[in-house]
Structures are given as structure tokens and as C-alpha cells.
Image: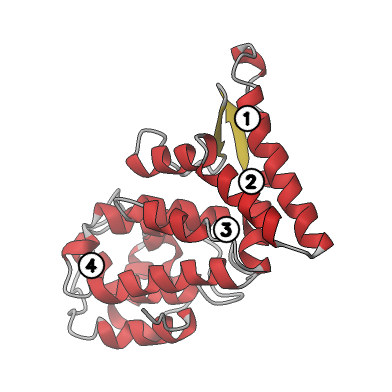
Amino acid sequence: MTVRPHAEVVAALDAAFGAVPRPTEIDSCPCCLWPEEADVLLSTPRRQLRADDLVSYGVNVMDTVGSAEDFRYFVPRLLELSLVIDGMDWPDLELTFIKLARADWQSWPEAAILAELMDALWADILTQDPSWLDVGALLCALGSAQPSITQRLHAWSALDNAASIANLHDFVTTQTDIRKGRLVPRNAYWDSTSATFAELSSWLSDGPATAAVQAAIASQTSEQVLAQLADIHIRLLQARSDTNRSPESQET
């Protein structure tokens, strides 16, 4: 299946959500969303909303501000601003995707374009080295919004280009911890009780990632890429070697 570039999907979000009516009010705690901030959200065309207009709403929606219904209206602009360079730094992408799950986005009529966006972002990790997109943040975001990431990890196991290897190197060597002999993601947004967290930990710790790295080592010739693969391999093996260490020393 051909995946459109993520920029094309992002550009199509507003039109895809065009049938969602603008809310006429936003129930909120006035300390979390000032009345004047709510007025801006309710009176400004969605595509004209700025990052600053959406920060308080985006952080607090479905907690002390708003509902899943008004989130459905604003989410295309939140995503658009979050996924452009110098667009929106807060709320983090992970938090927005967590809220998508809470809002049951897969039941929305617009679910298809959101799924396409997630596929397009993951395709960037597999084929590019996007400096603006943090692999650990995206993996956590996808793992928070979707019920399974097994197929994404399976695709990553191909390790058939320098970008996918560089992104795995970045993730494994700088964004994981070893806990009780398991390699786990460090990102604090992860729900460690979730099925997707278990899938990722199993992929990293139970052999699939190690087998993928070993196969890539056998096929690569670039010294730089081989050095990255060696670093990844060492980290994966380190987790296994730490299985019998004391609990106090098992987080690195």
C-alpha cells in the first residue's frame, strides 16, 4: 500500500473534518481556560487558530476543559500545528494522541485520515531521518492511540535502509532503560500496563529486535551503519545480561 507523505495528509486534515460543527460553547474551569481564550476558540475559523490560542485547551481538554465532542472539532488544527516545524511545542504529541484514545477516535467518521496520518508518520521513521520528529515520542504517541503496534515493529525489523537503522539507534541507545532484565522505553507518557508497552518491551527484550539487528549486520557494508548496529546490539544484549542484577542497579 502506498502511503502519502505526511505533509499531504496533514494538509488534508481540515477538509476531512469539514463536516464537524464548530462548538457554540466550551465547558471549562476558568482557571484552566480563561473566558477570553474560549471566546477566541469559538469565534475564530479553525484554520486561523494559532498555537498560542490552543495551548490551554489542548493541555486540559477532557480533564477540566471541554469534551470529546469539541476536541473532535479542534483536533485537526492541533495536529497540524504539532506536526510542522516551529509550529506547536506544547502540548506534546504524545498527550494529544493519548487524548485521541480517550475520545475514541476510531469510532469517528474521520478515523480513516487519522489512521493514514499515523501510517505516514511511521513511514517517515522507516525511510527518513526526520530531525524534527522524535522517534521515541512518535512511538509512544502511536502506542497510546492505537490498540497494537506489532505490525509497526515488524516493519521496523526489516532495517533495510540507513534511516530506519539510525532511528532505531537513537531510540535504543538514548531513550530506553533496563528494568529487571527488560529493555523498556523511557518516555514518561507510556502507560506501562498497556498492551502496546508490553509489545514494545517484548520486541526489544525477547529476541525479535536482536534477530533483526543481526540480520542487518550480515547485509550491511557501510562502516557507519555497522557501527550503529553494533551499538544497538550491545544495548540489547546488555538488557539480557542484567537479568540477575539487584533491583537497585537495574535502571540505566
What residue would you read off at disc 4?
Answer: 70
In this view, 103 is above or below 241: below
Would you say residue 148 is visible in this rendering? yes
Disc 2 vs disc 4: Cβ atoms closer than 8 Å?
A: no
Disc 1, SS: helix
The type of residue carrying mark 4 is Asp
In this view, 250 is above or below 81: above
**Figure coloring:** secondary structure
> Of label 2 and label 4, which has the lower sequence position?
4
The type of residue carrying mark 2 is Val
Percent position of residue 111, x then y:
23, 70
> Of label 1 and label 2, which has the lower sequence position?
2
Say which quadrant the N terminus sits in: bottom left
What residue would you read off at disc 3?
Answer: 135
What residue would you read off at disc 2?
Answer: 172
Residue lying at the far top in this picture: please name it: 246
The type of residue carrying mark 3 is Val
C-alpha gap between disc 1 and disc 4: 44 Å
What residue would you read off at disc 1?
Answer: 239
Disc 2, SS: helix
* Foreground of the two, 164 or 34: 164
C-alpha gap between disc 1 and disc 3: 20 Å
Labels 4, 3: front one: 3
Say which quadrant the C terminus sits in: top right
Q: Which residue is painted at 50% across and 44% down in the image?
A: 208
> Of label 1 and label 3, which has the lower sequence position?
3
Disc 3, SS: helix
Few, some or many C-alpha atoms within 10 Å of disc 1 (few <14, some 14-19, many ≥20)? many
C-alpha gap between disc 4 and disc 3: 29 Å
C-alpha gap between disc 1 and disc 2: 11 Å
> Of label 3 and label 2, which has the lower sequence position?
3
